[in-house]
Amino acid sequence: MPQSYFSSGRIFKDFGRLLGMFALGLVVGVFFHYLLFRLGLPVQPFIYAAF
Amino acid sequence: MNASASSPKTAGAIWLLAAFAAGIIVSLTTLAVVGRQAAEKNFHPGFTRFHQKIAPDTKYYPTIHEMMAIVRERAAGGKILVVVGGNSILYGVGQPAGHVWTERLQRELGPAYAVVNLAMRGAGVTDCAAVVAEALRTEFPRQIYLANASPTQASFPDGTPSYRFVFWEAIAKGLLIDDPTRTEAIRERYRLRPDTLGGLPEQRLREALDAILSFDDFWNRFTFATCNTIWTRERPVGLDSFAPRKIYTDNEPDYLTFPILDRRPTGWRFDAELGFSRDVSLLAFTLAPSGLWVPNQPLWDALAKSIGGAIPPSLRARTLIILTRNNPYYLDRLTPAEQQRDDLAHTLSVQVWQHAGCESVDCGRGYTIDDYGDRIHLSSTGGEKLAQQIATEVRRISTKLQY
């Protein structure tokens, strides 16, 4: 007799995968947020000569 | 059969994708909210000025809210706000922490005033501090904005290219006055000087995104208080490069400790600096056959027009423009006619600013060679003189505006 979705433990496996993807999304979001900040900055700093 | 087998797989993939997207959305939303709160309160304890380790010189770009928070904390309790903008002269290059002219100005004015030095190297009249003061016009109606300029220096309506990020950030966040004259002046600027447009569309897109996601406020605070995330050649390497910016102190050198030859050069350096001193008023006047200096009118008209487009009319009465002079070490070596032309340029410039509705004062007349560290920057002693002179002006304007 096949085990049910719950009793076979697949629910935990699938939930774990969902949680993993959610966590990955969180990390990618943070990285993207930083990227928006960082890529908008000038490559060269403003060099102060004499003003 | 294939369809029934792939259906659960497809559904599973969609759920995984949805979880991934939800993670991104939750992450961005949380960071945006935290970022917005990050700059609500001042995170620069004991702020004196944006020294090089927390300035664009080392790729640290203060945000408008970050600067507004500094001002709010300093001016709390109903003080009259004095926001100092302008360039390295008012920043206090060559004046070490504890001897900066604005600290002296604060002492001169007393606790009823709050002096905040937001001047930056190479900045103009309309840069960072001007934007901050304008953004706080309603919150702090009793305010005076100071900046310095050279006699014929026109003002960019949206700031100099290095610092216009503050203006466009404030525009994106709806913090500035909607002034049609300024809007037209900005259009004209980029129509006449397309070479200065470089990077502006990207800048505006960035600021529009930042108004939603607050990444500048979040990462600036993180960089300042927790862990550096912007690396430059001027900073340490290795693990030390991760040190938060807050650990760096204001280590501006003291001009008065420099060798005398550095402050009073000879040879080619002297010749070059003398030439720069001469150039201050070179194009401002022409010598008539009668021996009188005649204003080069198009240049002065351009200055007057630039003021009209740069400063909204309602802000002009509380704006004090300081016309700073060059070191007498050089001025005294100009010909008598050139000295007269330099004097006239400062006098006429004051009149042009005043005619536009701003306050203006000519500073540096009567300063000694030791009051300067180089051709243009003041030493601590020059800073003291400037503070005394400006304190008088600030009190006069406060009385005039019934503060």
Image (cartoon, rainbow, N blue to C red):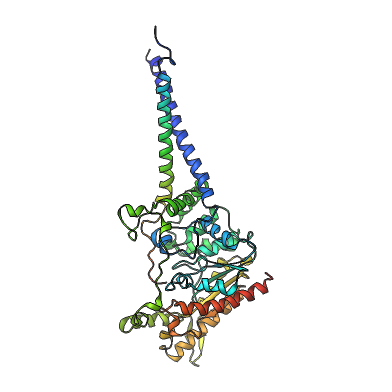
Q: Write the residue at 39% across / 9% down.
A: A2
Picture mark count:
0
- Relative to residue B73, is residue B100 drawn left or right? left
**Where in the figure is residue B389, as x and y percent of width and height?**
56, 79
Is residue B146 positioned above or below B269 on the image?
Answer: above
Is residue B282 visible in the rendered image? The answer is no
Q: Work out whether residue B207 or residue B289 is closer to the camera in this orientation and state it.
A: B207
Q: Work out whether residue B289 or residue B78 is closer to the camera in this orientation and state it.
A: B78
Position of the N terminus of chain B by quadrant: top left
- Relative to residue B75, is residue B331 drawn left or right? left
**Where in the figure is residue B151, as x and y percent of width and height?**
50, 77
Is residue B74 positioned above or below B7 on the image?
Answer: below
Q: Work out whether residue B195 or residue B214 is closer to the camera in this orientation and state it.
A: B214
**Where in the figure is residue B282, as x and y percent of width and height?**
44, 81
Position of the C terminus of chain B by quadrant: bottom right
**Where in the figure is residue B256, as x and y percent of width and height?**
40, 78
Is residue B218 visible in the rendered image? The answer is yes
Q: Write the residue at 40% across / 35% down.
A: A24
Q: Residue furthest top?
A: A1
